Image: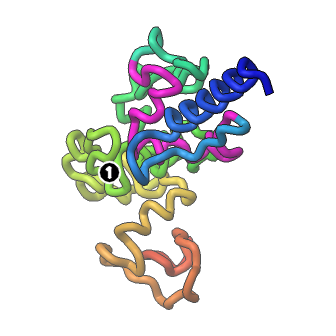
Amino acid sequence: MSKLKWMAGSCFALALTLLAWGCSGAKSGAAAPFSPVKGEHPANWMQVHYADYAKAPEQCRNCHGSTSDPALAGGISKVSCFTCHTEVPHPTSFAGYLQHGRQAAQLAPSTVPTAMAGFAHCAKCHGADYQGGLANVSCKACHTKAPHPAKPWIGAAGSAPTHTATNINNAPECFKCHAAGANSTLKPLTTPPAGTAPGCYNDTMCHSQKF
């Protein structure tokens, strides 16, 4: 092997090593999964990448550039976070309760990473307890009577706000506080089999049947 070929091969190997290190993050235990051979993340990366971003945001910037300024985004990967995240962190009018409140409560969680739907989507950035999380912005800063508005918030359909308008697919988030009827005056009539998925009308929380 000629010296020139050896040097070229060594430089290529070094470049792959640096790329893998840069995209996997410098913090021990915080590295995002990345294949230096394929030069890409796992197939399900779009659905789960927020979790690794939360561990160490700087590791994303190593390859994708700025995560706050679109003009400086893209980095060595030439893939900007703003390609998908076009309105970061939220659209201009998102603070209005008729927009973000209804999208959280009245829409089912979506498998589309950028879809702002369901309480679980809020939890990605604001924490599983909604106290701040990655965004360091607590939902309770505005929702001072959280987790629910002042009574009677279980009013009839059409009233605002109303418990009955909550999408039943948000049940796993409600379950965090209401497992087996906890924090409620209404208790389930029976104990469901172990492992039963949280639901609104299956005795896992407050209700045994739909009224």
- Residue 207 horizontal side relative to residue 181, left or right: right
Q: The residue under label 1 is which amino acid type? A: Tyr
Which percent across, then down, holds residue 158? 46, 46
Which percent across, then down, holds residue 165? 49, 52
Segment colored magenta: 39-68
> Is residue 56 found inside the magenta-colored segment of the image?
yes
Q: Residue furthest front?
A: 2
Can you identify the residue that label 1 sits on? 130
Q: Residue at x 47, y 57 (%)?
A: 164
Q: Nearer the viewer, residue 125 or 174?
A: 125
Q: Quadrant of residue 201?
A: bottom right
> Is residue 40 found inside the magenta-colored segment of the image?
yes
Tell me, yes or no, if residue 211 can be seen here.
Answer: no
Q: Quadrant of residue 147?
A: bottom left
Q: Residue furthest right?
A: 1
| Predominant secondary structure, magenta span | helix
Q: Quadrant where the N terminus lies? A: top right
